[in-house]
């Protein structure tokens, strides 16, 4: 059941757009990082990485996806998956032609970044994908991703996911009645404590319990329409994967299976990292991001 829970592992995708070579003196050149959160969370979840990036001289932007963080939209106002992704897509589209950005995504944020990569492949030369089973090019994988909380390599259906997601204090809401599909989902405080923040400071858990927001249940049809990747476009970008060794939702062996099924170009691991890798091991994650980024 834990392996079928929401994709809670961290995804990093690096989009490198054309940049004036005069401003890039070498591999240690400062970069612009764009951070994309997981479902029910917001830009606030990256505050430790934001501080580390800024103190090291990097430019950094944390995105709030639709109805997340301080985004003013309410869940019922973004009934399409494209609405949820639009803050990131609009941001990437607005970048000047000479700007390089490093896109970092966590869980559902990884799908947002995959969409950006497929949309802007001509400006992408390297992508880093840690701890997120990014979509590959098979119909089976696309359907798996479309189940939203990512039941990888199994025959679970959406109802089975809903049943597991409702335990022990998560809330699955049926605004259209119990005979219709669920509409929204929010993570409960006890579940946060035992499954997402078990290796993280108690202060960060307290912060999360006050700031998580509901996520809309997007249909398989809707998500599959938005997240369709091709070998020619998305597949032209290199990828890396960072394993969170103590992740309780996506066990290490399951992460290794994702690596096997969709091999990246680089693999790193962080010992002692729970689902909230940017909270439990921020310095190690920061170091890994810079180390991989410097190779390109």
Image: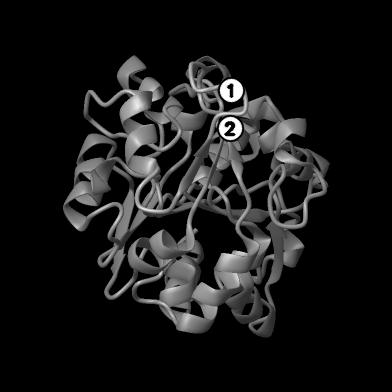
> What sort of colour scheme is used for the picture?
one colour
Across and down, in percent, residue 218 comes to 56, 27
Q: Local crowd at mark 2 within 10 Å, few (<14), some, or many (≥20)?
A: many
Q: Secondary structure at mark 2?
A: helix
Quadrant housing residue 245: bottom left
Sooner in the amino-acid sequence: mark 1 or mark 2: 2
Quadrant housing residue 235: top left
In the image, which disc is placed on residue 226? 1
Image quadrant for the N terminus? top left
Q: Is residue 4 visible?
A: yes
Residue depth check, mark 1 versus mark 2: number of the one nearer the observer: 1
Residue at image location 63% in from the left, 73% down from the top: 47
Looking at the image, do the residues carrying marks 1 and 2 touch, with CB atoms under 8 Å apart?
A: yes
Quadrant housing residue 151: top left
Total numbered labels: 2
Task: Report the side of 131 relative to 107 (left or right).
Answer: left
In this orientation, which residue lies closer to the viewer: 200 or 194?
194
Q: Secondary structure at mark 1?
A: helix
Say which residue label 2 marks.
115
Across and down, in percent, residue 177 comes to 56, 21
Task: Report the side of 249 relative to 74 (left or right).
Answer: left
Q: Is residue 287 visible?
A: no
Task: Report the side of 15 relative to 161 (left or right).
Answer: right
Residue at image location 25% in from the left, 50% down from the top: 255
Residue at image location 50% in from the left, 58% down from the top: 296
């Amino acid at each position: 059941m834990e392996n079928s829970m929401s994709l809670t592992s961290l995804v990093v995708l690096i989009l490198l757009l054309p940049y004036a070579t005069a401003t890039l003196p070498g591999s240690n050149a400062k970069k612009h990082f764009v951070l994309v959160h997981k479902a029910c969370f917001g830009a606030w979840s990256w505050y430790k990485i934001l501080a580390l990036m800024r103190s090291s001289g990097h430019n950094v932007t944390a995105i709030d996806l639709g109805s997340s963080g301080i985004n003013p939209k309410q869940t019922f106002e973004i009934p399409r998956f494209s609405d949820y992704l639009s803050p990131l897509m609009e941001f990437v589209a607005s970048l000047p032609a000479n700007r390089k950005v490093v896109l970092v995504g966590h869980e559902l944020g990884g799908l947002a970044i995959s969409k950006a990569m497929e949309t802007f492949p001509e400006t992408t030369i390297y992508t880093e994908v840690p701890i997120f089973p990014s979509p590959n090019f098979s119909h089976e994988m696309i359907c798996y991703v479309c189940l939203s909380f990512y039941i990888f390599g199994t025959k679970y259906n959406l109802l089975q996911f809903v049943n597991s997601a409702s335990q022990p204090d998560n809330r699955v809401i049926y605004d259209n009645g119990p005979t219709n599909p669920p509409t929204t989902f929010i993570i409960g405080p006890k579940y946060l404590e035992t499954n997402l923040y078990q290796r993280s400071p108690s202060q960060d858990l307290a912060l999360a319990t006050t700031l998580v927001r509901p996520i809309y249940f997007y249909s398989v049809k809707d998500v599959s329409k938005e997240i369709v990747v091709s070998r020619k476009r998305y597949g032209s970008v290199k990828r890396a994967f960072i394993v969170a060794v103590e992740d309780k939702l996506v066990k290490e062996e399951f992460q290794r299976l994702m690596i096997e099924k969709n091999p990246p170009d680089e693999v790193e691991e962080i010992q002692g990292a729970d689902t909230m890798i940017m909270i439990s091991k921020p310095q190690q994650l920061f170091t890994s991001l810079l180390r991989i980024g410097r190779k390109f």
